[in-house]
Image (cartoon, rainbow, N blue to C red):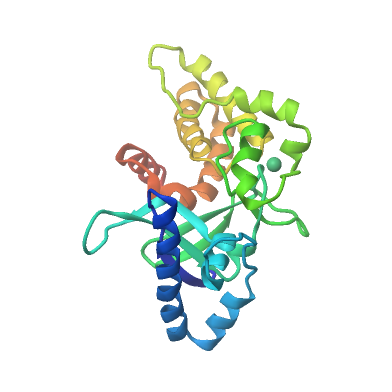
Amino acid sequence: MVPRCLLFIDTLQLATQAQKVQALVEREDLLQSLFRRMLPERCAALWALQPSTDRDESGPIMKRIRKNGLDMAEYTFSAINGPDKQYIALNEDISRANHSCRPNAKYTFHRPSFSSRLRAVRDIKAGEEICISYVPLNGPCAQRQGHLAPYGFNCSCAACADHTVSDERRARISISVVEDEKVPKRQEFERISEQIELLQREGLECLPVYFNNILYMLRLCAQVGEWAKLSTYNEKMMGLSPLFSDGMDEEQAEQLAFLGL
Ligand SMILES: [Zn+2]
């Protein structure tokens, strides 16, 4: 899915409340001037997005960015003058996706085409709602609800509804893949199998650590002779590689190239 990006604007990073209020007024003036140059159908699409209910100095366009803007924390772009900046994208379709702590899709930005993308991270059944995550997902339910507070809702996804089991499982997930050369490969195979199983049970296929575990697992499968599993994980990798290939380091890219992905 390659939806249209309506607006793409740098985030405000200011220290004091007074600076923020002044900057919001100035930002709305800038946004209004951009808005007047947009095609009529794009203006209508932007206006159709729901505004935030914040009682602050934000104007009508900024309120729509606050409610619907997608954080692009993973991406920085070099400014013509000054330091690199982080940006928010406002999209006609993706901005309407609801949150889940078990998201079945991931939002990415494709630099070469300068477009937003929404990709499935696992199989999605017919009629199933497509959800993305608005917040970091590694922590327990209470932490996620704290991150979600500014959005004005309590998440009631399956991980939050049954959070005792989910919290215990998420606590056992390592936030990064650490390869230990001294440990026997079979033991490493069992450890990484368990991590992948935990991530799948928690619906966390959107996390880079899931991708990194699969990548490591492909090597382990070959090393311990688990050929059937190698084929299964290879299939998963083929589905995931477009999602994460932008953020790969050189060694990972070489491994994918070796695998023909
Ligand atoms: Zn949730």
- Quarter the N terminus occupies: bottom right
Q: Nearer the viewer, residue 164 or 199?
A: 164
**Residue displayed at 60% across by 68% down:** 93
Q: Is residue 96 left or right of residue 158?
A: left
Q: Is residue 141 left or right of residue 196?
A: right
Instruction: Tell me which image quadrant ligand 1 sits in.
Output: top right
**Residue 261 visible at all:** no
Rendering quarter of residue 256: top left
Is residue 84 positioned above or below 40 on the image? above
**Residue displayed at 63% across by 52% down:** 151
**Residue 158 visible at all:** yes
Which residue is farthest bottom? 40
Is residue 138 positioned above or below 153 on the image? above
Q: Is residue 79 left or right of residue 25?
A: left
Q: Position of residue 110 (x, y in %)?
A: 42, 61
Q: Position of residue 195 (x, y in %)?
A: 58, 26
Rendering quarter of residue 60: bottom right
